[in-house]
Amino acid sequence: MPGRRVYLETFGCQMNELDSELVAGQLASLGYQFTPRVAEADVVLYNTCSVREQAEQKVWSRLGELRESKSDKPEMVVGVLGCMAERDGTDLMDRMPVVDVMCGPAELDKLPLLIDNAVRTRQSLVTDDPNAATKSVKSAALQGSASRRSGTLAAAGDSLEYLDLSRSVSPIDPAGSLNKSAYVRITRGCNKFCTYCVVPFTRGAEIHRPPAHIIDEVKRLADQGVTEITLLGQTVNHYRFEHDSALVSNGITQPQKGQAFKGGHRRDPLAGSNVTTFADLLYQLHENAPSVQRLRFVTSYPRDFGDDVLEVMRDCPRLCRYLHVPAQTGSDRMLKKMNRGYTVSEYNEFIDRARHYLHQPEIGRPLMISGDIIVGFPTETNEDFDKTVELLERTRYKSCFIFKYSPRPGTVAYDKIPDDVPNAVKRERNNALLAVQSRISDEISREQVGNEFDIMIEGPSQHAIKASGLSTKKANNGVQLTIGGKSADEPDAVSVAAVLERTEAETVQFSGRTDGDQIVMFDAPTAKAADLAGQIRRVRITEGAGLSLFGELV
Ligand code: 5AD
Ligand code: SF4
């Protein structure tokens, strides 16, 4: 459909950002163009998130707003993609008749076909009978529970894998973009079934991509100038690929059902020969893509994180000293109700072991850890909550996301455990934890004063962009993210040259990140700042406050 303009907005997690990038690449290769304005769009797509109710409400309100645009422009095609499409199913179309296309996260390879179909049928409806525009031909690709029912992946091949394989780098990347970082998926779906979580239902059973596909993708991104890669998976350390049992379809090795090695610290006895473990994968990526300066991964699961992974992280200098490892709560009673599969002491053991291997502030490489916590899970008492405060004090996260429990239809908790903690209590606990975490983040930032770090420079800071009079709010290509999946209001969407041209002062504030993912601001001479972005430079920290460090180039 050459010339059709698409508005694509992404909600939710990094996995969704990557999905949107792949979808956008695919649509661009078919001749679609992108616009930042709904009013100019022929096709409006929302890639949605279901993890908490609030995320869904945003999409409902966007869809509500669309009703008017669509009555002005009846041939407009509206698509809801992602987890909300999968979770709500076609009920969503009944509730919101503006929606023409729905596509779950495990079916995104079918999206171009669905859109094409919708565009054609809408056009003919509009031309043949103007009144018919309110009727629409709806189409949906949702996996339902199909992937859970089948024991093996379809013999015909996992067509979703082709979407990742066909990644184009990157027709949607705006000219002058600074973006040098990218996400690469290593696993899809999740088998854990934490009782509050909708992910196993929306993204389906856990599967692991063949290591050769992941390595090729990273190498291709590296060849195109990407210097920072974040590997994505719901529980990355469960990555494991058994070569002997790999299925090949149409000459392409297929992803495999997730079969984690549950050996705690121990090394998988099959590692290296028949099996590629997570540690093997990290090592091979590190060795095969030397131009990638920073390699990190999210999200780690606190159990079954082997010493072999920690050793690889310790020994490979371009693997970042950063772990995102959610505890969710500091109470064993709550962990059990959440079906998390570990105890607080096991969590603590992992944090201590990780610090033992990886925390080396004396060489500028402290280990930074971040987490997620849910407050107000059903039956949570003050005593349970106090234990979560204790966990925060003990773990000392660099930063931590704190969420109020939100019951999600379809999950075990929704069906079996009444949401009995009043919202006011959830809010109070949320605020109390935020205060504890802000204090800890601030302390950790202050502790860095006097230390030196190699930082990867990202570009002018938000402060510098605003000072130059440029808006930080808009992508110039209409896709609400760029190649690394950063949102358009991050500095990448604005070119460095544009900021420097508009900066009259002799120095301009730039920002970068340590390999532990701490943000560092520093002043650079405006005249010499043009090619700083993307470089790794050493800074000495002069000040630390909140989540930010301030330093000077050395
Ligand atoms: N309510 C609140 N937070 C949730 N999360 C997942 N499901 C829910 C829910 N129903 C949080 C968890 C997870 C993060 C991505 O979102 O902390 O780690
Ligand atoms: Fe959800 Fe638990 Fe799987 Fe994470 S591990 S995606 S919280 S079910």
Image: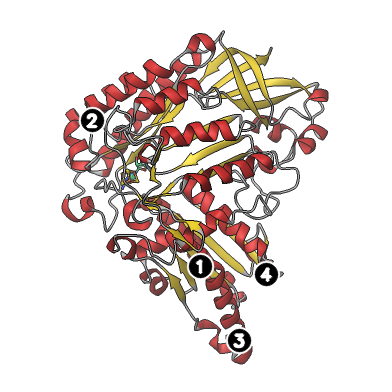
Q: Quadrant of the N terminus?
A: bottom right
Closer mark to the observer between disc 2 and disc 3: 3
The answer for how far apart the CA atoms under marks 4 and 2 are is: 52 Å
Secondary structure beneath dot 2 equals helix
Q: Which residue is mark 4?
A: 4
What amino acid type is highlighted by mark number 2?
Answer: Phe
Position above or below: 372 against 389: below
Relative to 41, 387 lies left or right: left
Circle 2 Cα neighbour tier, 10 Å, few/some/many (<14 / 14–19 / ≥20): many
Q: Could you tell me if residue 380 is visible in this image?
A: no
87 vs 228: above or below? below
Label 4 SS: loop
Q: Which residue position holds label 2? A: 385
Give the mark toward the camera: 2 or 1: 1
Decide if residue 292 is in sight here: yes
Q: What number is the disc on residue 110? A: 1
Ligand 2's image quarter is top left
